Amino acid sequence: MRLSRNTTRNTKKGRNRMKAARVAMVFAMIAAMPAVTVLAEASNPDILTRMQIFMPQRAEDWDAGSGVELQARFWSSKSFGTALSLGFDSWAAKSEFSDTSDAQGTMTTSIYGNMTVIPVGVSALYRNNVSDRVALVFEAGVRYLFLKSNINADVVTDDASGTSHFKDKITTDNVFAAVFGVSVESAITDTMSFHLGVGYQLGLTEPHETFSGEDMGTTSFNSPMVDVGVTWAF
């Protein structure tokens, strides 16, 4: 997240971004098609509730991320299943302070806040029963990340015309992402299991940041992640 006097829109990137979004949407629709079949034939459903910790790869933009996810999982057999997911995450923006000077004057910028992320999506699951009470679960899925910005930028300029102060939010495009993970699930009771997993979130589209209507460039929600939770069968 960087602000400058010469921050401008890049219309060519904007067109490329729209094309990438369309490709990602087609990918998501194709990925969801087998889910419909699995859900129609599913039995032995369960619910997974998990807490997630994200370790953003774009360290210059993000400090950390965390959240919760609820999955309704439908198993068509002992090994194969599909999950419908809804989450609520918060990504802390990298706090920044800069003070720059040039021939026109000085500009002081302060950036702080967080991004609320609501991921919605579907996953394909494969379960390998290691023993009667322990299973490995592999997951591959697609998420659409709805983004609501609480990231503020305060800009103070001092030039020949005087001193001015401006404050606005830095907004970011919604984004498609793929998720991949593997977890260990250990039975606590006949209907409850402990869940511990690791995974990776990979952006399928390149979200742009905007400040006061001007394009600031791209950011990323790519991140390794760790999750812990509980499943309930019914």
Image: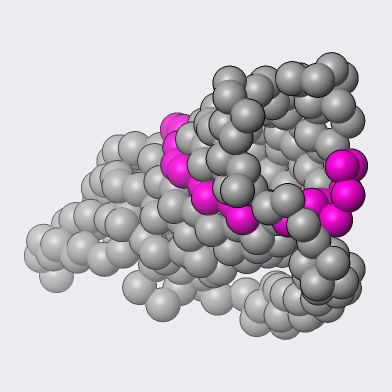
Q: Quadrant of residue 148?
A: bottom left
Q: In x, y percent, where is residue 70?
A: 53, 50
Residue shown at 48% from the left, 59% from the top: 118
Specify start and end residues of the magenta stretch as a single range.
Answer: 61-82
Return the residue nearer the eye: 194 or 28: 194
Residue shown at 55% from the left, 76% from the top: 9
**Quick check: is 179 in the magenta stretch?**
no
Residue shown at 31% from the left, 57% from the top: 150
Residue shown at 41% from the left, 46% from the top: 90
- Image side of residue 128 versus residue 88, left or right: right
Outermost residue, front direction? 190
**Quick check: is 80 in the magenta stretch?**
yes
Q: In x, y percent, where is residue 131?
A: 84, 17
Q: Quadrant of residue 104?
A: bottom left
- Image side of residue 190 versus residue 147, left or right: right
As displayed, is residue 122 above or below residue 37? Answer: above
Outermost residue, left direction? 162
Q: In x, y percent, where is residue 20?
A: 78, 72
- Image side of residue 190 versus residue 133, left or right: left
Q: In x, y percent, where is residue 186?
A: 67, 21
As displayed, is residue 159 above or below residue 16? Answer: above
